[in-house]
Amino acid sequence: MKVRRRTILGGMASLLAAPFALSLDPAGAAEKIRIGFLLKTMQEERYQRDKAAFLARAKAMGAEVIFDSANNDEQSQLAAFENMMSQGARVIVLQPVNTGTAGNMVTSAHKSNVKVVGYDSMLVNGPLDAMVMQDSWAVGKLQAEAMVAWLKGRYGSVKGNVVLIRGQPGDSNANTMSSGVLEVLKANPNLKLVADQSHEGWSPDKAMATAENLLTKFGNRIDAVICNNSGMARGVVAALDAQGLANADKVFVAGSDADLVNIQFVAQGKQAADIWKKITPLAESAVETAVTLAQNPDKDPKTLLKFDRLINNGAVDVPTIVTPVVLVDKANLDSTIIAEGFYTRQQVYGK
């Protein structure tokens, strides 16, 4: 198995206390903490922000980071994970490629006295030490509620043909986001779910092909398309554009991740809405969690962390920190994305 070269990034010598930790051991301040940060991919634009925010917070806390991503490949991620352990990572922050099998990596890490913090996507059936994530169920619910409001505005009632574009088959994050959508659909019986399709690798091209096939099958009579991420929403918009339907007054499209192109689409009226997952609090909370656990290797994470809820992942109750998500549409784009400095007006509007 070929293992790509890993990157280790250094930080300041002194550690600052994590804001939600009950205590940090001052005696450990002189010792450099080494943590791993392993993303499933860098395919989406947002992950550049995750990486940058994580590294900046780690540097401020005096921690070294071993970073890698897996190009949505399960075996590449396993190799990178093992490499991080061999390089002395005391805690690994993991966004799993396969949420159904990644529990085996956690079990392996524990045998080497390495803790694992889940990031963004909850793995199942593994003894995860802590989790930092957005409320994925709320993402889907916000998308679907925006769709309901759009349909009421267009038809005067909640009716129409709806498509659900999911990410990786079986991915827990994709399933949780989709469950938020499906709950709203269930409450509105005049909505018809004409397709509910998963896409390997969260592929925009595969999402575009799905949309093209559905537009052909239903004679362009698709009212709304809800996508688990921004990349797949771009694929859907491309398919609609080829039919002259890439218009938020004609077809409702929602994505999630707030990639710049999608926010530009919202501004231009090509896409109705996107979900802004606030990246900085997510990444910073993950660093602070990892450093706290590394500083207190023999203590129960539940006694160390100020977490929002316990979530059972099929193996254990995982202390979980939940960070904010915001629906962005044309009406609130300026007061959210731009006002908080995520993108500039120049980036969004080109002026």
Image (spheres, helix red, strand yellow):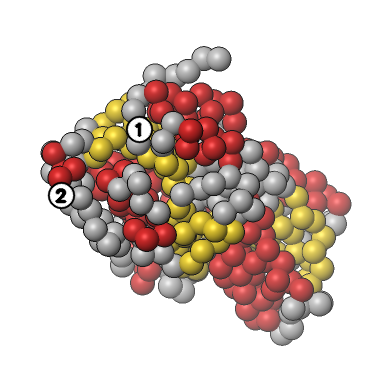
Q: Is residue 255 left or right of residue 24?
A: right
- Residue at the spot x=39%, y=23% of the render? 86
Residue at which label 1 appears: 89
Q: Is 35 displayed left or right of 73 in the figure? A: left
Residue 348 on image: x %, y %: 39, 56
Badge 2: residue crowd in 10 Å (few <14, some 14–19, many ≥20): few
Q: Is residue 101 left or right of residue 40?
A: right
From where the camera sits, is residue 227 visible? no
Instruction: Choose top left, top right, bottom left or bottom right for residue 1.
Output: top right
Q: Secondary structure at mark 1?
A: loop
Q: Is 227 or 279 nearer to us in this picture?
A: 279
For the residue marked with disc 2, what is the amino acid? Pro
Residue 182 x, y percent position in the rendering: 72, 67
> What residue occupies the far top of the structure in this picture?
2
Above or below, 154 against 197 in this view is below
Location of mark 2 (residue) = 26
Residue 63 percent location from the top left of the image: 24, 39
Instruction: Name the image quarter holding residue 202.
Output: top right
Mark 1 is on which residue type?
Answer: Ala
Q: Nearer the viewer, residue 14 or 137?
A: 14
Q: Residue at x 21, y 46 (%)?
A: 61
